Image (cartoon, rainbow, N blue to C red):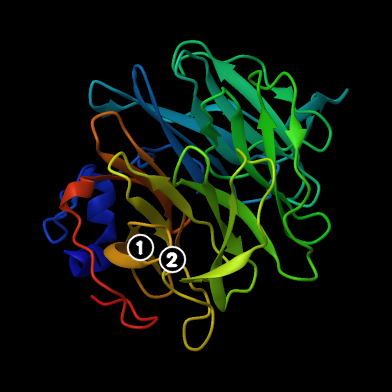
Amino acid sequence: MPAIRQLFPTLFVLAGTVVLADDPGVISTQFLNSNNPRPPSCHASTIEETPNGLIAAWFGGTHEKNPDVGIWVVREINGQWTAPVEIANGIQYARSDGSVHRHPTWNPVLFQYPDGPLMLFYKCGPSPRTWWGMVMSSPDCGETWTIPVRLPEHIDGPVRNKPILMNDGTLLCGSSTESDGWRVHFELTQDRGATWKRTAAVHSEKQIGAIQPTFLQHTEDRIEALCRNRNGNSRILTTSSTDNGKTWTKLKETSLPNPNSGIDAVTLKDGRHLLIYNHTNRSGTKPRGREMINIGMSDDGVTWKAAAILDKEPRSEFSYPAVIQSSDGMVHVTYTWKRQLIRHVRIDPSRLVSKPYDGDRWPF
């Protein structure tokens, strides 16, 4: 099946939902924005479960960094995905000649509070060095949205991956900045975004470059954050907190490679940890490093095993995943497919078969 997908990718775009018989844990895969008209480029998806079903979002436009890039949303209703709708853009003001001054938008992150509302965080600005945080909310599971509001100065919100809600009601967001080197920090709000606190950077840029943390929740008191590494020939980085995200340990390398590409993880209801990432690097004959996207599984967050390949094609890009586990136990993954489409994969984690890595090599 993977070989057929590589030879005839257009067939799979038009087919909608496809069952991958060669991967027992993968139930189906579907493109969320295959219908025309659509922006020629898209990236950085996010997915969440609401009381009315799944919802996903991404940024799309002519190309990344172009001022016409906006935030697009689709909702799953009665098992069918709606057509994509642009719900946010970077328009700042209208000029006297009728044109507008507009910036690109970036990295949407959806989060559903258990008793509402649905939150959408995203970035706006010319580049990751100069962007700022924005937030809007929906009282009806994504059907309608409030007017976007800019977050306070030096608060970006979750920079790419979903936040986690602590037992005391605090929303813990993994954040980072790229304005003075790549630095990871964390932001917390106890009142649904009315006020915020931001931790100090976990590391100095002179030591290492890291951004875009994603969370594993080991116990009520211990949270681990896995981070993207700027060194494309190195490893995913990790840091931990035992005080509900207020302070964090020094970053250190895990055993998993990272080609300077985004990752996302989720702690499953059965206690296992599932990671979506590129099991590649940027050295040798494969300089891009995003031509294969993978599932890793771990019982403890330290020792990882290979579970599945979601996509693989030389000189292509499969990147920036988002992952959640829905209330029915299924795992949902979205990721960028060749910068053209957003793919949604439905996974039964109980059926995934894990194997030890062969050193740094993918074992199957």
Q: Residues within 10 Å of mark 2 (few under 14, many from 20)?
A: many
Depicted 255 relative to depicted 156: above or below: below
Q: Is residue 274 found left or right of 92 in the rendered image? A: left
Depth order, front residue of 337/197: 197
Identified at 24% across, 68% down, the residue is 7
Q: Is residue 318 found left or right of 157 in the rendered image? A: left
Q: Residue 72, percent across and down?
A: 51, 33
Residue sitting at the far right? 96
Identify the residue position indicated by label 2 in the image: 278
Identified at 41% across, 45% down, the residue is 266
Identified at 64% across, 63% down, the residue is 251
**Labelled disc at residue 294:** 1
The quadrant in which the C terminus is found is bottom left
| Residue type of the residue flagged with mark 2 | Asn
Q: Are the residues flagged by discs 1 and 2 in contact, CB closer than 8 Å?
A: yes
Residue sitting at the far bottom? 284
Q: Quadrant of residue 147?
A: top right
The quadrant in which the N terminus is found is bottom left
Q: Quadrant of residue 155?
A: top right
Q: Residue 24, percent across and down?
A: 13, 55
| Residue type of the residue flagged with mark 1 | Asn
Identified at 35% across, 62% down, the residue is 294
Depicted 142 relative to depicted 66: above or below: above
Q: Residue 44, percent across and down?
A: 53, 47
Depicted 228 relative to depicted 19: above or below: below
Depth order, front residue of 287/151: 151
- Distance (Cα) linking label 1 and label 2: 6 Å
Q: Residues within 10 Å of mark 1 (few under 14, many from 20)?
A: many
Q: Is residue 189 found left or right of 18 in the rendered image? A: right
One can see residue 342 in this view: no
Which of disc 2 and disc 1 is earlier in sequence? 2
One can see residue 209 in this view: yes
